[in-house]
Amino acid sequence: MARDLGDFLWLLAGGFGPWEAATSYEPDWIPRPNRDLTAIAEQFAPGRHRSAATVIELATQEFPEFDDTVMELCR
């Protein structure tokens, strides 16, 4: 989903939650950026603004086995 808290805050600000970041099962879903969450991201992760797509891609690159690891823990 995100590599660290700063990225996660910007993911939320962009209208994405953990479910939306981890899945692509709802093709009609449209993200709705949130001004309040954007203000929080600007306060706690200034200068780190990234699009949700970039946050997700960077996390996927850094933690390529994340989904498999979580699924193994759920069994």
Image (cartoon, rainbow, N blue to C red):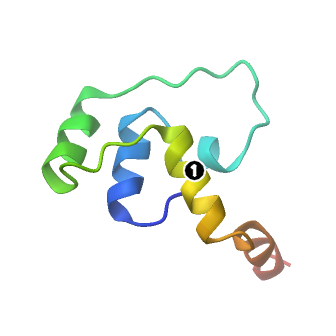
- 7, above or below 62, in the image: above
The image quarter containing residue 39 is: top left
Q: In which quarter of the image is the N terminus?
A: bottom right
- 39, above or below 48, in the image: above
Q: Nearer the viewer, residue 27 or 63?
A: 63
Pinpoint residue 35: horizontal percent, then vertical percent.
Answer: 25, 27
Q: How many residues crowd around disc 1 within 10 Å: few (fewer than 14), some, or many (20 or more)?
A: many
Tell me the residue at 75%/78% (across/down): 69
Tell me the residue at 41%/54% (across/down): 8
SS class of the residue under badge 1?
A: helix
- 21, above or below 1, in the image: above
Q: Quadrant of the C terminus?
A: bottom right
Pinpoint residue 47: horizontal percent, then vertical percent.
Answer: 21, 48
Q: Is residue 48 left or right of residue 3?
A: left
Disc 1 residue type (three-letter): Ile
Q: Is residue 22 left or right of residue 73?
A: left
Pinpoint residue 44: horizontal percent, then vertical percent.
Answer: 18, 55
Pinpoint residue 70: horizontal percent, then vertical percent.
Answer: 73, 73
Q: In this view, does 40 lie to the left or right of 75?
A: left
Tell me the residue at 39%/42% (across/down): 50
Q: Nearer the viewer, residue 31 or 3?
A: 3
- 23, above or below 1, in the image: above
Q: In this view, does 33 lie to the left or right of 38?
A: right
Residue furthest to the right in view is 75
Check disc 1 and report the residue beneath it.
Answer: 56
Tell me the residue at 22%/54% (across/down): 45
